[in-house]
Image (cartoon, helix red, strand yellow):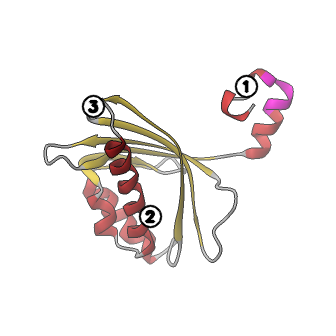
Amino acid sequence: MTTTDDVAAVTSVLNELVAAWGRHDADAYGELFTDDATYITFLGTLYQGRQGIVDSHRSLFAGFLKGTKLADEVLDIRFPGPDVAVVNGRGDTYKGKRPSRLTKIQTYTLVRQGDRQWRIAAFHNTKRKPLRESLSYRFAPGLIPATEK
């Protein structure tokens, strides 16, 4: 049975993820993932394992994403089992002012491990294409998700 404590614990992991990104702390970022986690970027790159996630973020924080912050917005949290949470949300990286529209849609799968800590077992990040979305909705209204009607 899911409790408000479970929701708070899962939300806390995501808040810690944003904070670790803000500090550009690849090790702290990676600690929020399981040892065997999978991480798919919006480019389609697949990283497997915590160490791959840490190494890639260390490089990103020193290069392409240097000085960025992470914006995250939770849309839904579901618990398909007592120790599994699926989170859908929107996110983006930015410098300066937080963007009002987040351009990526994300799915996190979290598991509660033996130490009772929630960690991210899988992450998938997809770039939204709002113009294509709106065109497809215009020509095929049946494609509009119920949450957007």
Q: Which residue is mark 2?
A: 18
Name the residue type under label 2.
Answer: Val
Crowdedness near tag 1: few (<14), some (14–19) or many (≥20) residues, C-alpha within 10 Å: few
Label ID, residue 143: 1
Disc 3 is placed on an element classified as loop
Foreground pick, 72 / 9: 9
Q: Residue at x 85, y 26 (%)?
A: 139
Per the rendered image, the range of residues in magenta is 136-141
Q: How many numbered marks does the figure carry?
A: 3
Q: Position of residue 90 (x, y in %)?
A: 57, 50
Disc 2 is placed on an element classified as helix
- Disc nearest the viewer among 3 and 2: 3
Q: Earlier in the sequence, mark 3 or mark 1?
A: 3
Name the residue type under label 1.
Answer: Leu
- Disc nearest the viewer among 3 and 1: 3
Look at the picture and state if 55 lies above or below 49.
below
**Left or right relative to 140: residue 32:** left
Measured Cα–Cα span from mark 3 to mark 1: 32 Å
Q: Position of residue 115 (x, y in %)?
A: 14, 48
Label ID, residue 65: none
Q: Residue at x 39, y 65 (%)?
A: 57
Label ID, residue 82: 3
Disc 1 is placed on an element classified as helix
Q: Is residue 143 magenta?
A: no
Image-quadrant location for residue 144: top right
- Main secondary structure type of the part rendered in magenta: helix
